Image (cartoon, rainbow, N blue to C red):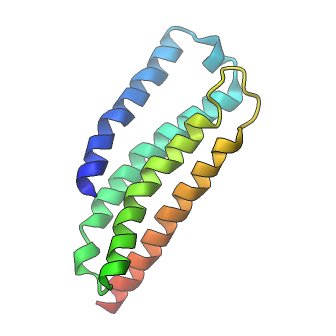
Amino acid sequence: MAAILLIVVPTIEFGGYSLLRMIAKRDPGYLENSVRRHMFRAGHAHAGVWVIFALVALLYVDKANLSETARTIVRWGFAAGPILTPLGFFLAVVSPKAQRPNKMIVFIYLGALSLGVATVLLGIGLLRA
């Protein structure tokens, strides 16, 4: 799972580059659309922070007193959260004219749920260890 998250890092870098390019070129689809601007920034921020959190948390999975099934759920949850949530932020406002998020916003909730479940399970497993 750590390998997947490390491979995702360049996509976060590309996202930062894309945001910078939209700002520098004064892209009206970004600068004049506050919903899109806020969603893109939130997606980029969540991706960066959650990938770091997940990489650190994965170091503790083998130290936790969890079944193999629970460890698998934790590992997948920590990988899915930082991928699904930013995906939702970006895909929910793909159109430069979007005035509110579309149905793809569901990915934000799925990613948050994945990360939340993984975090709680890992915490319980560490308390039991």
Report the residue that reaches farthest toward the top: 25
Q: Is residue 20 above or below residue 47?
A: above
**Where is residue 92 drawn, in percent x and y?**
64, 37
**Where is residue 10 drawn, in percent x and y?**
30, 34
Residue at the location (71% across, 38% down)?
102
Please give left or right for residue 17 compared with residue 38 in the image: left
**Where is residue 88 drawn, in percent x and y?**
57, 43
In the figure, residue 100 lies in which quadrant? top right
- State the count of labels: 0
Q: Is residue 42 above or below residue 98?
A: below
Quadrant of image for the N terminus: bottom left
Q: Nearer the viewer, residue 72 or 25?
A: 72
Please give left or right for residue 80 compared with residue 7 in the image: right
In the figure, residue 123 lies in which quadrant? bottom left
Residue at the location (37% across, 27% down)?
14
Residue at the location (42% across, 64% down)?
77
Quadrant of image for the C terminus: bottom left
Report the residue that reaches farthest toward the right: 99
Q: Is residue 87 above or below residue 121?
A: above
